[in-house]
Amino acid sequence: MTAPSQPSRSDLLGYAAQGRSWEFIAPAEAMLRGSPGDHELRATLIVHASAVGLKTLAQEQVEHLPRAVRDTGAVKAARATIDALPGDGVPPRLLSATLRANLDALATHGVDMHGLLADWERRLAGVSVYRASNGNIVWRKRSIDDSLGPWVSLEDRRTPVERARLAFLSDKGQIDPANPSKPIVIEGLDPPWLAARVHGATPRMPDGSGVHLFLVQRDWMELLDGLSLVDLRPVLGDERVDVFVGEDAPQRLEAYFLDRLHLTLPAALLRAPGLRRAFDPPLDDLFRSLHERQSRALERLSVQAKGVYEGRGRAWWARRFDDALSGRGEPLRVLLPISRYSTFVRHSAEDAARALRARGCEAVVLTEPDNHSKLASLAYLREFVDWRPDLLVLINYTRRQLGGAVPPEVPFVCWVQDRMPHLANPELGAAHGELDFLAGCCPPDLFNLFGYPASRSAYAPVPACEEKFHAGPVAPPLARAHGCEVAYVSHQSEPPEASLERLLAQFQPQPSVQRAFRLAFDAVVRAVGGDTPCTLRSGLDLPGVFREAGITNPDPRMVSSFMGLGLIPLGERVYRHATLRWAADLCERRGWRLHLYGRGWERHPTLHRFARGPLEHDEELRAVYRSARAHLHASITTNAHQRVAECALSGGLMLRRGPSPDYEPVRQNLSRLIAERFAPTRVLENSDWIVEAALPGGHEDWSAPDPVRARRMRGAAPPAPNPDGTYTLEWRVPAVWRASAFAQTPRIDLGQFPDYAFPDAHESMFSTPQELEASLGRAVEDDAWRERAIAGHRRQAMAKMTVSAFVDRMLAFVRTGLSR
């Protein structure tokens, strides 16, 4: 192999003419050692050395020029620049101090290198170190008599690192929160720029997760050299950074990852430029072998899991569930995989696991071991082979989305806790088999448009934990701290206009989508941002928005994403902030205290004065629910919200904004009940039924229609009672519902909807600023009414809105589904 050719003199002058200073400096300095009389080349070196801030090099080159040349042209101008430059020498004591600070941080990882300091400092006496204006480090040898020797390193090792395109970074140079990187291995910390850049470009995500970084170095002294150059304590002290040093580092890395094959392995191996002693054999070989071993282990466990569950069909599982839930067989084993990076999901799974154990089941929450690891498919399969669960409950994801991590023969519940655009996929709906179940906040589109089977689906709002949110007394200090007339708990503090701009930035390459969002946002503000009762459905012409924006024949998935990712969150912000504007004006006028809890309210342009900071999902939140005279809830999607249930269970009062966003699902399910119980009184030309019947009102039989509760949800007065105390119901049952909707959507237990099921639910609702003032006035001033409302709300929440109630329904629902 031939060595790369050195640039010629004309090449070097070409570099200089193009402003490629760092490419010019090192070879020019080397060439001048053999051609000291080349004054043109030396003058050019002086100009470029001063341009990058290498004052010492530039001054030395000036000294090598004859005096007549020093005072001419570019050299004379460069000398003025040189005189103005700060000193570029890095004092040895600064290098030692930087190294000691970094070693202290490194020791927190169990890598203590303080014992090598003396040897390193003796080596330091043989070099002089200089820092360029861009922070790059160069150095030269120093003789025993302290005279300066030749330059050894004049390359720019920093700029290439900063400009390098790293595959795991977005075009903006940052990690993509929606697609976080797998672990990254960096070989070499001398120079330290690569490690510093990667660490800075992979900050902790909003959900608390971080990219796992592995810093690996073969040579101890090479590592010390790098650690002396820059303060790396933010990197070395980060819990997501692990460091392996020494000749045996590959063996220790191998042992580390073999013990963690159930986690995602590194996908990127980077090397610092100028690495002097790389590992041999290279680390690439090690990680290639690790990935192969993980693949083989996955294949082996897949075969073993298939052997465990093979032959277990629906009938087998029906017997297993019957035996376990009746107490005749072994306890049911339930696996709940989660991501620890979602606090909300983690709390839900842990609460559900406790409720399952209380019912005699065994329950395991499978999650990452720390904030910088991700579970691989191996983690799931290992549980199926070793523990052999009977049911898997996964929040917000289907079996299909886990690939081959879940055997097809295991009953599976996708627990939907929010409107999830990624579920709006007909392939996922079609992939549901006879052992797949859907439970939770299931919008009708999942069934009507995307083919999820209604027969194996159950609607359930996100439940509240009755153990955590109980009605016991609150500690006096907490009660004093959180006592107020009105409280609101939410992280949705960003003003709607700012949310819109942030959303539009995500669709910069799609101007038609941006225009659609602007048009829709204006319509949303008109519909739900004012003081008059209105719903998003009645105030938004979405097909018209798409037409005006130039979007023709939008795909159902695109429409679902448009709503779920953009429009509904924007509408929620508009609706909630308008409600808080009412409350703020009212509280200031009446002299009431308003507390806003959650992240970011202190930065709100008009509501910042009410901010009280975020709360943990623990006793302090319960104290807040219980200590305010009233809490507020406003949502365009549902009032059957976890916070409403938590507040009720805690012995607090939640006032909910209407007209009820839950009226449509309640209306459809009431129509189903009515169509099943009654013949039509008359049939309209479009085949809609009109049903008239005398029924009791205000009852708590959720399987029977209640005309009083239904009318109250719309803010309408109930019909006058009949002499026998019943109410005459006149109800329209649309023909399209009888033909398809009843079959395509799951039945709903109406007792889960606060606006329908809370006793006298209308008394704790408001639709205008005037109604809010009346409701708050009653909550603040009428103790008897408030206590009566709280007792009724809590009783209903305990019956239908707890984690225990959800677990009971889920187990019964799966058991019934398996037995059909």
Image: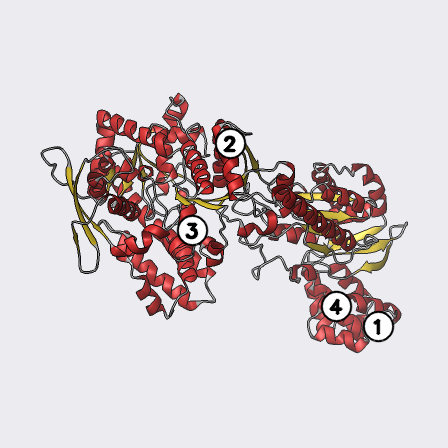
Q: CA distance from mark 2 to mark 4?
A: 77 Å
Q: CA distance from mark 2 to mark 1?
A: 80 Å
Q: Amino acid under label 1? A: Ser
Q: Indicate which disc, 3 or 2, sits on the residue closer to the N terminus.
A: 2
Q: Quadrant of the C terminus?
A: top left
Residue with the mark numbered 4: 23
Disc 1 or disc 3, which is closer to the eye?
3
Q: Indicate which disc, 1 or 4, sits on the residue closer to the N terminus.
A: 1
| The one of 413 and 74 positioned closer to us in this rendering | 413
Q: Amino acid under label 3? A: Pro
Tell me residue 422's x, y (percent): 47, 54
Q: Residue at x 36, y 52 (%)?
A: 744
Residue sitting at the far right = 144
Q: Secondary structure at mark 1?
A: loop
Residue with the mark numbered 2: 323
| Vertical position of residue 141 compared to residue 392: above or below | below
- The crowd level at tag 1 (other Cα within 10 Å; few <14, some 14-19, many 20+) is few
| The one of 598 and 93 positioned closer to us in this rendering | 598
- The crowd level at tag 3 (other Cα within 10 Å; few <14, some 14-19, many 20+) is many
Q: CA distance from mark 1 to mark 3?
A: 69 Å
Evaluate if marks 1 and 3 touch, with contact meaning CB atoms under 8 Å apart. no
Q: Residue at x 33, y 55 (%)?
A: 740
Evaluate if marks 3 and 2 touch, with contact meaning CB atoms under 8 Å apart. no
Q: Quadrant of the N terminus?
A: bottom right
Residue 33 placement: quadrant: bottom right
Evaluate if marks 2 and 1 touch, with contact meaning CB atoms under 8 Å apart. no
Evaluate if marks 3 and 4 touch, with contact meaning CB atoms under 8 Å apart. no
Disc 2 or disc 1, which is closer to the eye?
2
Disc 3 or disc 4, which is closer to the eye?
3
What label does residue 5 carry, if any? Answer: 1
